[in-house]
């Protein structure tokens, strides 16, 4: 896989049983790139390590005044230099490719999982944790995956050089062969503590990210209730905890780095001290001493990769664990389905509540509990929180359809839709039937003032479709964001459109026009709207009252508000005392009528 070939046609099925298993799965699934990195790494490290032998041969040739051997040494150094340059260039290229492709695979897996789970994802995992996994954690996972092949090349090079020194000069080679494992493994006792401190830092950073995300999302509300400083103080304390944890972690890693510098230096001193003694005794030549000294000095370069792989694994392990936790989540229903991918048509029926939305009609649903309304809307869209009897569309259970087909048939817009950053054209570029133009959808959603606001907020956008929308549409009011989201839903033109409180943030005049536009644009299509607004209820073909999880009444809005006290209580926001008083007045009037009839 090359960078230009991304994204993956299929990122595969990850092994999400644990963080280490997930890392191993990632490494195996880009084995070709890892082998390339290993090959170029060996060329690079071996070329670097061969330079001391060339230097030693050159020094000895100069001492022996051998021009032929000096020329041969020059040719070997040229060959090593070429291998070093080519190997370094291609190793960097292969390593970056491995890092990017691994990170892209993880991001695709996370995006696919989020799409499959839908709204159930944030009920099981905090939104801040999902953000942390898809940003910072992805980078650390990719770092370890690409560093593993470079570490392998460095380790193999260290073994080759140590064996070569033993053969080349046994007296000094044995010292190097004994000292190298000590140098390479000396940091292992320090790794558990460093890993624990890194885990603490990651945990605190994740909490700070969640707090920051929640604070920014609710900043407008916090300012309204005067809680802005309270939450900012909480974030300051959380960020200071992250800083202290990062300092403690950095101290541990600086100690490991010091060990990685100190021990090779001590090994180098031991080699020089031993080599000088052997040279005085005449047991080795000057060139051999220079060769061994240079080789030990050069080996500090590949040995640094031992520290890097330890850091990469320590930082990536908790990241992989969090990613595996998200990727291991499953829907309560199967995504494959047992039927073909043909979109059914007909009435929408929920056997749990008894709600029936006739095909091609505008049905309004009144539910006194907003949370229950949200759960029912998700059920109608085939997103149940728990496995239960499936909603039927034209007599076909949505659970029996493939997930993509079910979502094509029924679209649910929740009460807090999200606007992605980008241009308005990009926002409205969604899968659709093509029957509803963007202009008609924007008109039906009463977005004229929204378009003007977007043009005014963009410096170089004459066409409203090219105007930029900020993250989550924060530059727009709540009502403007709501209307843009409604226009986006109308463009898709699904067989069934379920809207949860689509006009809760707009004024009554705009709401009345939206109700007319919605009824006109969705004519002949099944539309279900969860609302308690009399303006929308009055324009619905039928209104259904859901009380305590079951359909309690159904009929036109005016009939229900005159004849059903429970419906009237929800729509008019009457309290229990007001209902009791109204019922008492009604009983008194009935008694008076009975007395009049008896006296007559």
Image: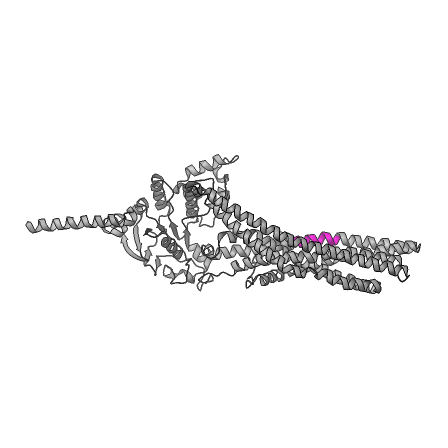
Judging depth in this view, the residue of 430 and 315 nearest the camera is 315
Could you say where residue 261 lies in the image, as x and y percent from the top left? Answer: 73, 54
Query: What is the x, y in percent for residue 404?
Result: 46, 57
Give the left or right position of residue 88, taking residue 375 as reference: right
Residue at the farthest left position: 600
Whether residue 216 is visible, yes or no, is no
Residue at 38% across, 50% down: 500
Q: Is residue 155 magenta?
A: no
Horizontal relation, residue 88 to residue 246: left or right:
right
Give left or right: position of 425 versus 1: left
Q: Quadrant of the N terminus?
A: bottom right
Residue 252, image quadrant: bottom right
In the drawing, does residue 357 fall left or right of residue 331?
Answer: left
Say how many tags the image has: 0
The answer to whether residue 143 of the structure is visible from this angle is yes
Q: Residue furthest right?
A: 65
Of residues 97 and 138, the one drawn nearer to the viewer in this rendering: 138
In the image, 317 versus 340, the foreground residue is 317
The magenta span reads 86-96
Could you say which is closer to the camera, residue 33 or residue 384? 384
Q: How is the image coloured?
A: one colour
The quadrant holding residue 13 is bottom right
Considering the whole magenta stretch, tell me its main secondary structure. Answer: helix
The x and y percentages for residue 414 are 41, 50
Q: Judge whether 456 appears above or below 66 on screen.
A: above
Residue 285 placed where, x, y %?
89, 59
């Amino acid at each position: 896989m090359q960078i230009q070939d991304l994204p993956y046609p299929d990122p595969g099925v990850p092994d999400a049983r644990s963080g280490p298993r997930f890392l191993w799965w990632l490494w195996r699934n880009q084995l070709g790139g890892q082998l390339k990195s290993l090959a170029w790494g060996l060329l690079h490290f071996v070329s670097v390590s061969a330079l001391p032998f060339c230097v030693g041969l050159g020094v000895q040739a100069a001492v022996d005044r051998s021009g032929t051997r000096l020329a041969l040494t020059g040719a070997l150094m040229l060959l090593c230099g070429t291998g070093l340059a080519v190997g370094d260039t291609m190793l960097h290229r292969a390593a970056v490719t491995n890092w990017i492709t691994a990170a892209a695979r993880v991001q695709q897996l996370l995006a696919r999982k989020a799409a499959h789970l839908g709204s159930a994802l944030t009920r099981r995992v905090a939104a801040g944790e999902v953000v942390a996994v898809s940003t910072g954690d992805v980078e650390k996972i990719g770092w370890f995956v690409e560093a593993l092949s470079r570490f392998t090349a460095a380790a193999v090079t260290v073994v080759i050089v140590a064996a070569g020194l033993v053969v080349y000069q046994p007296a000094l080679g044995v010292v190097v062969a004994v000292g190298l494992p000590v140098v390479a493994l000396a940091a292992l006792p320090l790794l558990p503590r460093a890993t624990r401190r890194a885990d603490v830092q990651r945990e605190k950073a994740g909490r700070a990210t969640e707090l920051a995300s929640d604070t920014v999302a609710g900043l407008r509300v916090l300012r309204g209730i005067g809680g802005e400083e309270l939450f900012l103080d909480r974030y300051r304390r959380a960020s200071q905890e992250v800083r202290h944890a990062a300092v403690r972690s950095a101290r541990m890693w600086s100690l490991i780095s010091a060990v990685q510098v100190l021990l090779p230096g001590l090994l180098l001193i031991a080699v020089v001290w031993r080599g000088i003694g052997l040279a005085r005794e005449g047991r080795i030549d000057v060139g051999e001493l220079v060769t061994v000294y240079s080789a030990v000095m050069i080996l500090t370069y590949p040995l640094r990769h031992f520290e890097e792989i330890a850091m990469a694994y320590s930082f990536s392990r908790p990241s992989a664990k969090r990613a595996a936790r998200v990727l291991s989540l499953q829907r309560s229903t199967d995504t494959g389905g047992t039927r073909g991918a043909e979109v059914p048509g007909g009435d929408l029926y929920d056997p749990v509540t008894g709600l029936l939305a006739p095909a091609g009609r505008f049905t309004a649903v009144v539910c006194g509990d907003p949370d229950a309304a949200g759960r029912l809307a998700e059920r109608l869209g085939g997103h149940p929180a728990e496995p239960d009897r499936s909603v039927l569309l034209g007599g076909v259970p949505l659970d029996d359809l493939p997930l993509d087909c079910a979502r094509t048939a029924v679209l649910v817009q929740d009460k807090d839709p999200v606007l992605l950053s980008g241009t308005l054209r990009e926002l409205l570029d969604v899968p659709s039937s093509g029957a509803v133009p963007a202009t008609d959808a924007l008109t039906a959603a009463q977005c004229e003032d929204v378009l003007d606001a977007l043009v005014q907020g963009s410096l170089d956008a004459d066409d409203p479709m090219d105007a930029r929308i900020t993250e989550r549409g924060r530059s727009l009011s709540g009502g403007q964001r709501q209307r843009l989201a409604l226009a986006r839903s109308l463009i898709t033109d699904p067989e069934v459109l379920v809207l949860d409180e689509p006009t809760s943030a707009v004024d009554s005049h705009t709401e009345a026009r939206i109700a007319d536009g919605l009824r006109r644009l969705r004519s002949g299509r099944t539309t279900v709207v969860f609302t308690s607004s009399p303006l929308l209820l009055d324009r619905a073909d039928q209104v259904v009252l859901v009380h305590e999880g079951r359909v309690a009444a159904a009929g036109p809005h005016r009939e229900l508000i005159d004849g059903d006290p429970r419906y009237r209580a929800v729509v008019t926001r009457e309290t229990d005392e007001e209902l009791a008083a109204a019922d008492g007045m009604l009983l008194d009037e009935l008694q008076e009528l009975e007395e009049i009839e008896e006296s007559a």
